[in-house]
Amino acid sequence: MVDIESIVFSRISSAIRTAFPSNFTTSTNGIITGEKVSAPSSFPAVCITEENNSVYLRSQDSSSVENHSDLMYEVEIYSNLSSGRKAQCKAIAKIVNDTMADMNFTRKPGSGIIPNANSSIARWFGRWTAVASKTEDNTVLIYRK
């Protein structure tokens, strides 16, 4: 298994914190987490989760060695601004998408604003996929699907 979850999380969270320093600098404002959150404790909130890490069958040889992993990440963004909730979600989503594209991930259909149980909170959802491998010296290689 090629495990790059910490790399993906670190790059996305760093890019978000750089782009929106006033929103993600203390524990009393926005949160970025690697787990799903049904009710964020502060806003804006960004949840980055690895939803699939399975063997990429097209590259598996007869020795059953896992050469590559088929990866899928989901990101959910929440905003509770009284005005501009959707715009805030989309601005953060652009940073996420640019970061994922820089790592060779492909955004999948169905990304965008989706209904939330609490209508005073905007929710943006996106999925990205890629295939990853590691070289003998542990260099991570990520390929678009």
Image (spheres, rainbow, N blue to C red):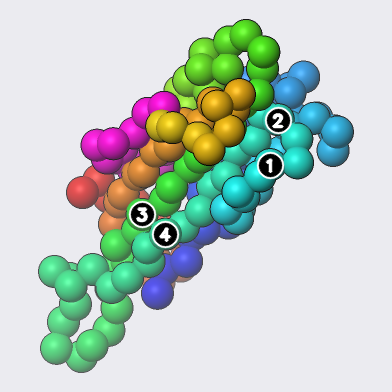
| Eye-nearest disc, 1 or 4 | 1
Q: Earlier in the sequence, mark 3 or mark 4?
A: 4
Q: Amino acid at mark 3?
A: Met
Residue at the image position 43 percent from the left and 37 percent from the top: 125
Q: Which residue is mark 3?
A: 72
Disc 2 is placed on an element classified as loop
Q: Which residue is mark 2?
A: 43
Tell me the kind of residue under disc 1: Pro
Specify the segment rendered in magenta: 98-113
Q: Are marks 4 and 2 in contact (CB under 8 Å)?
A: no
Say which of 80 and 110 sits in front: 80
Counting residues from the start of the chain, the first of labels 1 and 3 encountered is: 1
Residue 73 visible in the snapshot: yes
Residue receiving disc 4? 51
Tag nearer the camera, 4 or 2: 2
Quadrant showing the N terminus: bottom left
Real-space Cα separation, disc 3 to disc 4, in angstroms: 6 Å
- Is the Cβ of the residue at disc 1 closer than 8 Å to that at disc 2? yes
